[in-house]
Image (spheres, rainbow, N blue to C red):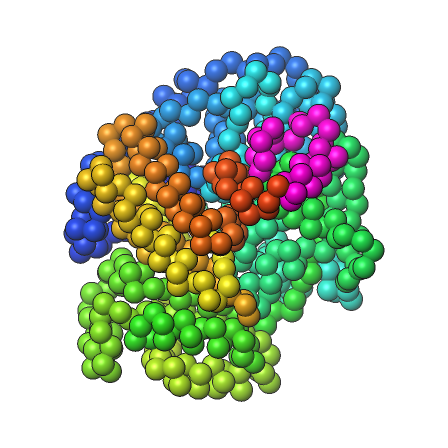
Amino acid sequence: MKRYNGWGDPAINAKLPDSAAKILENLAGPPRPAQNVALETILKKVPSPRTAESHPCISFDAAKRFEHAHGQSMPDWIAMRFGTLSSFPDAVATPATDSEAEDVLAFADRHRMTVIPYGGGTSVVGHLDVPESGTPVLSLSMEKMNKMIRLDPRNMIAEFEAGITGPQLENALHPHGFTLGHYPQSFDYSTLGGWVVTRSAGQQSLYYGRIENLFAGGSVIMPAGKMSLPPFPASAAGPDLRHAVLGSEGRMGLLTRAAVRISGIPENDRIYGIFFPDWETALSAVSQLANSDAPLSMIRLSNPSETYTNLFLAGHERQIGLLKSYLRLRGFSENNWCMMLMGLIGSSRLYSPGKRIARAMIRKNGGIWTGSPMGDAWRKNRFRAPYLRNTLWDKGYAVDTLETATIWDRVTPTMNAVENAIAGALDDLGEKVHVFTHLSHVYTSGSSIYTTYVFRLADSPEETHFRWRRIKDAASRAIVEQGGTISHQHGVGVDHKPYLGAEKGEAGMIVLRGLLRAADPKSRMNTGKLIDS
Ligand SMILES: Cc1cc2nc3c(=O)[nH]c(=O)nc-3n(C[C@H](O)[C@H](O)[C@H](O)COP(=O)(O)OP(=O)(O)OC[C@H]3O[C@@H](n4cnc5c(N)ncnc54)[C@H](O)[C@@H]3O)c2cc1C
C-alpha cells in the first residue's frame, strides 16, 4: 500500500516534536497549512486515454494511470498535493514475463506509443514525468517481474527479474546466507532495475560498492534488438556495455533481468556515533579514514547545521541535553560540532583490529566516540526518515534534497557554495530557506555532498513551484561552477538535464546521443529524459 500523494505506507506517520516545530518556525518562517486535494478529486481530472488499442497486459484504470504519472520529485509532490497533475500515461502495462514484456514493447511500437519503464516510482528528478505531446504514452510497470531466477553460490552471483524491490530481493537471499547489501533510503519501494539504470548508491556502499560494482550483467530489450550482458568477472573486450545500461534511465530499452554480485552475510555489522569539534577537523579525519585499513561500511558526516537540525528533530530533549552537556564539558562549542555515523563491518578476525584502527584515528583527530546507541537508532529508522517529508508538508513546509560529488580539495568550497546559493535564493521574496548538509558516501579521492533544504509552501502551486525552481537552479549553477557532478546518485531525469552538457562536454553529448539513437532509433523509450528528444 502506498500513499497516493506522498511518501510510503499510509499507516506510517513521522512525528515532529513541538519543540522542533518552534525551532523550524524561526529558521524557515511560520508555516501556512498545506492544501491537500483528495484522491477522488484528482481521479476525476484524469482524461480519457488517447488510444483505444488494447493488449491483455494493459489497463486503462484511472487510479493506476495516476499512480504511474509521477515519481517523488518536488514538482511531482507539488502536483500531487495541490491536485494539479496534468499529464497521465494513457495506459499502464504490467507484463509478468520477458516474453510478455517483449510483446508489450512490440505493441507500443506498432501503435507509435512512448514507453516509460516504471520500477518503484521513487525517482526524485522527474524520470517518470509524462511528456505533454500528442503521442500516446504507455507506462510499463515492472511490478509483476519480481522473482529470483537463479542463485549461484559457487560464482557468488544471483539473477533476478528487474522489477524486484529491495525487501523482496533481500528476503530471497537471506535464507541462503547471502545479501546484496544495497540499501538506498528508498529500499522499501525501489527496484533492482531502477537502481541499475539510475546508478544508485546504497547506504553501505563503502563496503558493498555502488550498484555499478554489483551489477554483473543482464538482459535489455531495446527497440534495436535484445542485448545480453554475460556476468564476466572482468573483461577487456572493448568498452563495457554494462556501463551504457547503467545510468541509461529507461532510454535504451527495458532491463528485464539483472545478475548481481552477492556477499555472505557479514559476521559483524555495527554503526557508531562520533562527534568532532568542528568541520575542518572532521573532514580531515574522514579523508584519513577513507584511506585507512578500517573495515568501513559507511561514513555519514553531518556539518554543524545538520548536526543541530538532527538533534532538534530527534526530540528526546533529556538525552540530547545530557549529550550536549558532555560535549561542552569536553570543550566543544555548540555552533561548530559535527556528528558522524561510522559503520564497521566484516569478519571477526578483521573487525576488532579494524575498529581499533578507526578509534585511534578518531581520537588522534579530536573526535569523541559515543558508542553504538546513535548508530542503532539510525539503523532502526534508516528507511523511516523520509516519512518526515509528509509531516512537514502537512505543517506547511516543503523539503527537498540534492547531491553532488567532488574530490577532497573541493568538498568544503562546494558545500559552502551550494548552501549559500540555496540559503539566499529567496531573499528578494522575503522567504527564508533552512539548509543543511552531510557527506553520505566517501571514496579514497573525495566524497558525495548531500544537501537538504526546507522552505515554506506558498498559497498556490505555481508560487511554490517558482520558489523551488529558484532554489534548484541556484544550487545546480553553484555545483557546475564548483566543478562537481550534477548528480552523485539520483540521476539526471528532467531536473538535471539542463546541466548535463556542462559536465559531459560537446563531444561527450554527441557520443551519448549516438548511443541512445542506436539503441532506440525512433526515440520511443522515455523520450525527453536524460537528454532532449
Ligand atoms: C525517500 C527516497 C530516498 C531515496 N534514497 C536514495 C538513496 O539512498 N540512494 C539512491 O541512489 N537513490 C535514492 N533515491 C532515489 C531513487 O530511489 C533511485 O533513483 C532508485 O534507483 C529509483 O528506482 P525505482 O525502481 O524507484 O525506479 P523508478 O523511479 O520507477 O524509475 C527511475 C528511472 O528508471 C527507469 N527504469 C525503472 N526500471 C527500469 C527497468 N527495469 N528497465 C529500464 N528502465 C527502468 C525509469 O524509466 C526511470 O527513468 C531515493 C528516493 C526517495 C524518494
Above-or-below relation of 253 to 83: below
Q: Position of residue 108 (x, y in %)?
A: 69, 23
Left/right of residue 319 with respect to residue 375 in the rendered view: left
Q: Which image quadrant for residue 302?
A: bottom left
Quarter of the picture for ligand 1? top right
- Magenta-colored span: 507-533
For this rendering, which residue is in front, 525 or 97?
525
Left/right of residue 499 with respect to residue 253 in the rendered view: left
Residue at 53%, 25% (x, y): give it.
Answer: 131
Residue at 79%, 38% (x, y): give it.
Answer: 226
- Magenta region includes residue 384: no
Q: Position of residue 249 (x, y in %)?
A: 60, 40
- Decide if residue 394 is in sight here: no
Please identify the quadrant where the C terminus is shown: top right
Q: Position of residue 432 (x, y in %)?
A: 23, 45
- Magenta region includes residue 508: yes
